[in-house]
Amino acid sequence: MKIKILGAGKTVTGSCYSISVGDEKILVDCGMFQGSKDIERLNYESFNINLKEYSALVLTHAHLDHCGRIPKLVKEGFRGKIFATSATKELAHIIMIDSANIAKKDTENENKRRAKEKLPPGKPLYTEADVKIAINLFKVVSYDEEIKITQNISAKFYNAGHILGASSIQLIVNDSGRKKIITFSGDIGQKESIIVKSTEPVSNSDYVFIESTYGDRLHPPISERESELLRVINESYTKGGKLLIPSFAVERAQDILYCIGKFQEMKLIPRVEVYLDSPMAMKATEVFSRHKEYYNKSVLNVLKTRKDAFNFPGLVHIKTTQESKALNSIKRPCIIIAGNGMCTAGRIKHHIRNSIDNPKNTLLLVGFQAEGTLGYWLEQGQKRIKLLGVEMDVRSKIESIDGFSGHADYLELIFWLKNFSPKPKKVFITHGEPLQIKAFSKRISKLGYDNYVPSMNEDIEI
C-alpha cells in the first residue's frame, strides 16, 4: 500500500493524498494552495498522476484548502465518485463556484497584461463548467456509517467539529489479505465550537495523518472568545469608526453573526449597523440554516427563543458591487464583515484600501493567517502595506482573536490523538507550517508517539 503526499506537506494548505492498494487508487481531499506567490503557483502544476486510474475521492470538508482543486481534477480527467457529508457537498459547491469566478477575473486581468507584452492569453485554473461536472460526482454519506469506496477500501466519516459537515475519515483497507486502518484527521475543531457539535473521537487506527495548524500554540480560554469580541465591538463604536472583520465565508462568518445577534439580544452592545458584504457567506449561511442537525446543544437551546441564529435587527446583506462601494462613504460607526479571512481576495481588500489609514477604524482578524498573506503581515504589525497597486500606511488599530479559529490547539490535537487505543504504529504530521510541525512533533514524541513529517510528493509505503 502506498500513500503519496500531493499537498499540505510541510505547508498548511493544498491538502491532497493519493492512496494506492494494488490497482485501486483513491484520493483524500484536493485543496487549493494559499499563501505566498510561490505557494500559489503550485495550483497550476500538474498532479503528475494518471487521474483516470482514480475511482474515488473522499472529502473531509468544504474549505478551499481541502476542496479547491477538485474542479481542476475534473478538468484533467478525473471522473470518480466524490464522497462527502450533505453539508460538505452544499458548501463545497458554493466555494468552488466562487473560486471559478475569481480564477476567471484573475485570468482576464492577467491577459490584459499579456496582450500588452504580445504574449498568448492564458486560461483560468478551471471554470464553472468544471465545477458543474464535479458536483454531479458527489455521493452523500452520513457520519459513523462504513461506506464501500472500492473493492478493497471502505471509509467511515466522523464528526471533526471544525465546520458544518466536517469529517475525520477512517479508511479500512484490505491489502493483500491484511487489514490496515488509516485515519486522516482533516481539520480538527476546538473542544467547544460556537455552532457545530464537538469533535467525535476515533478510537482505532494503525496509521494516522494529523493536521498541525496550531501545533505550537494554545488558544486563550473559551470564555475569552466572546468577551474579546464584545470588547472590540464596544471600543470600535466608542471611537466612532468602522470595524472591519475579514472573515472566511464558511463557519467564521456564521460564528460572528451568531455572537453579534446574541450580544444585541442581551443588550451588551449598542444598536449598530452590521453589513455582511460577502455573497458567498450569505449562501453559506443559508446552508447553515438548513442543517440544524449539525448544531450543538447550546445553539439549539437559543433557537427555542430566537427565531434565526444568524439574523438580527440592523443586519444588512450587501449583494452588489455598487452596494459594497457605497459602504466607503459611511462615516458613522458600523461593522463590515467581508471575505476573505486572510485578506488575499474578495471585497475586504477594497475596504482595507479605503479604511486602513484612518486611526478611528479597527481591523479584527478572527482566523488563521497563513504566512505570506496580507492578514499575516497585518497581524505581525507591519505599518506600511501595498494593496491593489497602492502603498499606504497602516493607521487603524489591528486586533486579533485566536479563540475564533476553527482549528484545535496543540493540547486539543493531543487529546484527539489520545483517543486511539492502542497507539497508532506511526503518526504522520501534515497541514502545518514548519515551526508548528516541529513543535508538535517534539510534543507527541515525548508522549511516546512514533511520528514522521512527510514532504510534498513523497511516497510512503505502509
Image: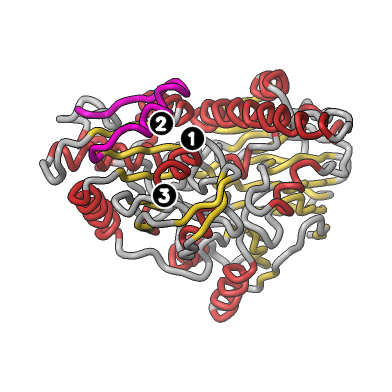
Which of these two is toward me, 10 or 241?
241
Sequence-earlier tag: 1 or 3: 1
Image-based side of 137 in relation to 145, left or right: right
Residue designated by label 1 = 347
* 1 vs 3, front mark: 3
- Residue at 44%, 63% (x, y): give it: 412
Q: Quadrant of residue 103?
A: top right
Would you call the spot at circle 1 few (<14 residues within 10 Å), some (14-19), or many (20 or more)?
many
From what the image shows, is residue 180 above or below residue 316? below
- Amino acid under label 1? Arg
Colour scheme employed for the rendering of this structure: secondary structure
Magenta run includes residue 316 = yes
Magenta run includes residue 304 = no
Residue designated by label 2 = 277
- Residue at 47%, 62% (x, y): give it: 383
- From where the camera sits, is residue 141 visible? no
Highlighted magenta segment, given as a residue range: 312-333
Residue designated by label 3 = 356
CB of mark 2 within 8 Å of CB of mark 1? Answer: yes
Mark 1–mark 3 distance (CA, rounded to whole Å): 14 Å
Sequence-earlier tag: 2 or 1: 2
- Residue at 51%, 70% (x, y): give it: 216
Q: Tell me the quarter of the image containing the C terminus.
A: bottom right
Mark 2–mark 1 distance (CA, rounded to whole Å): 7 Å
In the rendered image, residue 101, in percent from the top left (x then y), is placed at: 63, 26
- Amino acid under label 2? Asp
- Amino acid under label 3? Ile
Q: Secondary structure at mark 2?
A: strand
Q: Secondary structure at mark 1?
A: loop
Which of these two is toward me, 351 or 313?
351
